[in-house]
Image (cartoon, helix red, strand yellow):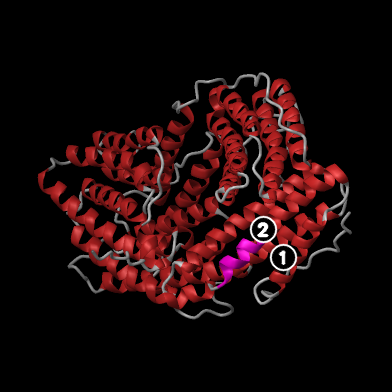
Amino acid sequence: MFRTTPVALPPWLAHALRAQRGPVPWSAVVRGGMAGGPLVLAAVLVGRPTLGVVAAIGAMLAGINDRPGSRRASVGRLGGPALAGAAGLLAGTYAGDLAPALVLTLLLTGLGLIAGGVSALGPVASSAGTQVLVGAAVGAGMPLPETGGERALAFLAGAGWLLALRLALPTPGSLAGDFRFDGERDAVAGVYDAIAALLDASGSPAATARRVALTAALDHAQDALAGPRLRRHAGSSAERRLHAQYAAALPLAEAATALAWAGEPVPGRAAQGPRRLAAAVRGNTHTGPLPAPSRTAPALRALDDALLNAAEAFDGGEARALHTRPRSGTALLRTAVGARGREYGIRVALCFGVSVAVAQALHHAHWYGTHEHWYWLPATTVFLVKPDLGPLVSRVLCRVAGTVLGALLFAGFAAVLPRPDGLIVLVAVCGALIPVATRHFAAQTAVVTVLVLALVMVGGEPQASGARIAETLLACGIVLLVGHLPMPGRRASGMQARLTEAGDAAQAYLAHVLSGSGDRAARWALRREAYRTLAEARTAVAVTSAELPALARHADGADEIVAMLERLADTITACAVHLDDTGRLTRQHTGQLSRLAQELSSHRTRLDLRLPRLPLAG
């Protein structure tokens, strides 16, 4: 009997087939179904269907950004990009009306350069960059009777309606305690659950994965607590309590990481305390008695002390909260114009500018007879060129598959559905499917394609599935070509910038720990920055590694550097806990730091990390 060995797929293909997993976000599904469809229906009833189309586009783009998280943080996550999209729609409308084709192409190319550089600042900025370019393309090319101001207001109304639903409708768990802080409570509770899971895995091969999961939980909680404050200074007592509970988790996370670094199992009762704290956060209740862990080692003593401090913070609720300092305007500008922002901006500008030029040429040549939808080509290019959406080849494959599937599905629906009632129902169904479809780019593309084609017909235009497929293929060709062009400076400079930021953050964390400073709040903030930048660097390396071989080769060895930096951060954490308890480091700590310094020194072409002078071992 012969046994066949499964053939491993190349990374660029395996990534395209990978999808996110998790429970269905039913509350987001309900919001999506109540967003675009009712807006279009209301506009049709008052005789202004095209206004409803623009409003539904705003709601659709906001729905793509409607991810799990806190209610207040959604204000910036949905509202910021919506404002950018409305501004782009306004500017694009007047530019399309007043500027000749060549000037319009140059203006949109310059806008692409700015939006691409801004997109390097983070997920919300990236969404804003995407929406400003999509809005500019739609405003310049979509034939609508409304003025630019009316279009921008309709777009904002659509996004604002979805945001209002997010703020007003209850979500699972929101009725336990203060309605406003459901997402925050769940995020903070997730941190305590992740700490308990790491303690359970200490001394086992699963410890590394559990520590990565703890970092992700801390990042999620930090983002959830970063929403707009209810008052300018102090905030409400419920808000201060949540911040205190998050701050109380940081020393627990530090002790759990130190225990995992030591590689020895811990007593099972050690994880019971964090789990009870997680339940108290979710239920907005008191913790009750917490089981005390053993105090036979420095990290166990640190864990016990952290549990006692957490119990005080939970019962009193007025413990001093830890706040991370936001990046300054200078730091943001440095990122936008730095290596990462420049590479991002140049590629976005080239792809967007070339697609606008090609679309304009085809439009004036009357390709497809009338070719009224020339804005589809640059709008499609915007989503394809964004590197934060995954590797380039994966985006292209998923875009093609999703567009073909969506266009064929819509062609079938258009043949049997009544107009406009059936199309409006189709818009509502697609809006409800978006929160689930965002787990895979091909599924999201298919749903959005059906939704957009339905909106086009509601606006009074003919069925356009064939044109949608053709222009998507053309956009994919443009992005693949520009994405592989040589650029000034180093290739994969975005990934390199992430590695450099992670190395700098680890070095700052180590310098603080070895300085003997007693400012633990500053240490925990530096630890958070070190692990967060490491997670971002690992994501950047994974994305580059999943490109076609011509681009993936620039990530060779980068994953080893990230792994070394992660071991360095874990070692620094173990050193901090041991120094708190004894005031001196053991030979195990100094030896591991020295070995990591030697290993990292061999990668100076990618990372220049200088370790401070190590204290003598006791």
- In the image: residue 552, left or right of residue 559: left
Q: Position of residue 105 (x, y in %)?
A: 41, 70
Which disc, if any, is residue 384? none
Q: Left or right? Give the position of 270 relative to 349.
A: right
Q: Residue sitting at 87 percent across and 57 percent down?
A: 617
User: Residue 324: x percent and y percent?
Assistant: 71, 44
Query: Around disc 1, counting alpha carbons within 10 Å, would you say few (fewer than 14), some (14 to 19), or many (20 or more)?
Result: some
Q: Earlier in the sequence, mark 1 or mark 2?
A: 2
Q: Main secondary structure of the magenta part?
A: helix
Q: Which residue in the structure is indicated by mark 1?
A: 596
Residue 408 belongs to the span the image colors magenta: no
Q: Which residues are magenta?
A: 557-566
Residue 173 horizontal side relative to residue 33, left or right:
right
Camera sees residue 402: yes
Quadrant of the image containing the N terminus? bottom left
The image quadrant that residue 354 belongs to is bottom left
Residue bearing mark 2:
567
Inspect the image, locate mark 2, and give the three-letter code of the amino acid beneath it.
Arg
User: Mark 2 and mark 1 in contact (Cβ < 8 Å)?
Assistant: yes
